Amino acid sequence: MGQQTDKQPSVLRSLDWWTIGIYLALLAFGWLSVCGASYTYGDTDIFSLSTRSGMQIVWIGTSICLGFVLLMLDDRFYDTFAYIIYAILLLLLFATIFNPHEIKGSRSWLVLGPLRLQPAEFAKFATALAVSKLMSTYGFNMHRWKDMAAAFAVVLLPMLFIVAQKETGSALVYISFFLMFYREGMTGSVLFTGVAMVIYFVVGIRYEEALMFDTTTSIGKFAVLLLVQIFTSGMVYVYCKDKQQALTILVYSVGITLLALLFAVFVIPFDIVWVQLAVSAGLVGYLVYLWMNRRIKHYLYILLFTIGSIAFFYSADYVLNNIMEPHQRVRINVLLGLDEDLAGAGYNVHQSEIAIGSGGLKGKGFLNGTQTKLKFVPEQDTDFIFCTVGEEEGFLGSAGVLLLFLALILRLIKMAERQPFKFGRVYGYCVLSIFLFHVFINVGMVLGLTPVIGIPLPFFSYGGSSLWGFTILLFIFLRIDAGRNLIRT
């Protein structure tokens, strides 16, 4: 213990001051953006606590104090109490489901007098700690289904509670943990399956109503079923190392589909999808035969992928049209270009695009934005705050903010890779994944490139819960990293 005590003063010197500098720069630019987004012509005091810019100073000050407190704790505290912290946040999330206070259709807020807290923002670091603790236990292996399922469960449980609070956007953030899982050894097939599902959904839904040539065939359904067959062939080649079987599957699937297409176009028009479904059924039967005959488990996984792909597409189509709320369905249709709805679901994105475009190269200057001052963009100081950066600071300012986030991401990668223990590395990649997801989705949302799911831009969006949550997430990792050189006795 004496050796560790002698080394303790070096913790401050071991801190990654570059990351702290980036954090402070983001806080400063974030506050300027909140000022620009919330300022009204005629305001004389942007520092008043009655204004959102004034309150944001309070959140920034308390966040810095909170970060300092986290740095003063022993780094082993986070490892030791990871499960307890996770359990406490789960209880808070569960209790929030029954919260009588509903804000903007969501029950995700706990109202404590004048203070409103969103447990979902704090559950991110708690989940990151818990999954890091689990994955750093002796003998844990992501290649074992039992271990991988346990890690998935730790992430999915808070996600389900948040969905029950009607806060879908915050729940989707937990998908980012799969980037960390991939870094820690999760098979690439799981990641590929996720990407394939996104492709099926976008292509299938986007072109579902479009018909192919003079037939009654849906281009969306035709394309998805063809992709399933091509992907299945590719997976047989990659994972089973069986070039002959992969080529057989590809030739028969594409060949029969092509013949059916020619027949439908030049002889009798009919829905080719029925032929593709028959081909898919034959493909499933063939995979069952290969699995039972050769006893190679990869054939079973590919079989499940094929069945799951078809089931996912048809169930996603049903969910979109029969289960989702109308406003959710409209948002997806607007994103996919099926509806324009500039006065409804597409209004926010359309106005934010106008604001960003009006900024030009250098912007209109601090507090000189017209779209934001006249309140054309809803949620312009929270979810859509990046449009304020684009309007007031222009392309150069927006690029500068994105470069700051890029610097933070690169710094987090470097810090994660130098961790001497798996707990620190896993937690570091959790932090990295969460920040990357937030920045990518939020900026993409403002530019009309990703769905409008209502998640904040780290250190920019107005509010205490998100700012505290991101600060805790980052400073716990800074403290873990600072202890990497301490002598343990």
Image: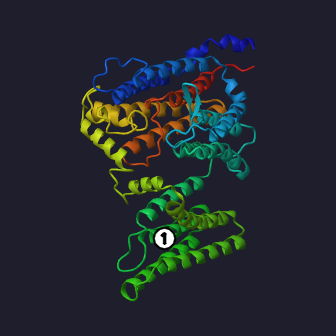
In the displayed structure, would residue 282 be above or below residue 377?
below
> For the residue labelled by badge 1, is the local secondary structure a helix, a strand or a loop?
helix
How would you rate the neighbour count of disc 1 (Cα within 10 Å): few for under 14, some for 14-19, many for 20 or more?
many
Q: Mark 1 — residue?
A: 226
Residue at 60 percent of width and 38 percent of height: 100
Residue at 40 percent of width and 23 percent of height: 53
Q: From this viewpoint, is residue 228 visible?
A: yes
Residue at 67 percent of width and 65 percent of height: 300
Question: How is the structure coloured here?
Answer: rainbow
Q: Quadrant of residue 136?
A: top right
**Residue 415: x and y, percent?**
55, 29
Nearer to me, 91 or 151: 91
Nearer to me, 125 or 142: 125
Q: Amino acid at mark 1?
A: Leu
Q: Quadrant of the N terminus?
A: top right
In the displayed structure, would residue 28 be above or below residue 445?
above
**Farthest bottom residue?**
267
**Residue 334: x and y, percent?**
39, 55
Q: Quadrant of residue 349?
A: top left
Residue at 47 percent of width and 36 percent of height: 456
In the displayed structure, would residue 312 be above or below residue 75?
below
Nearer to me, 414 or 314: 314
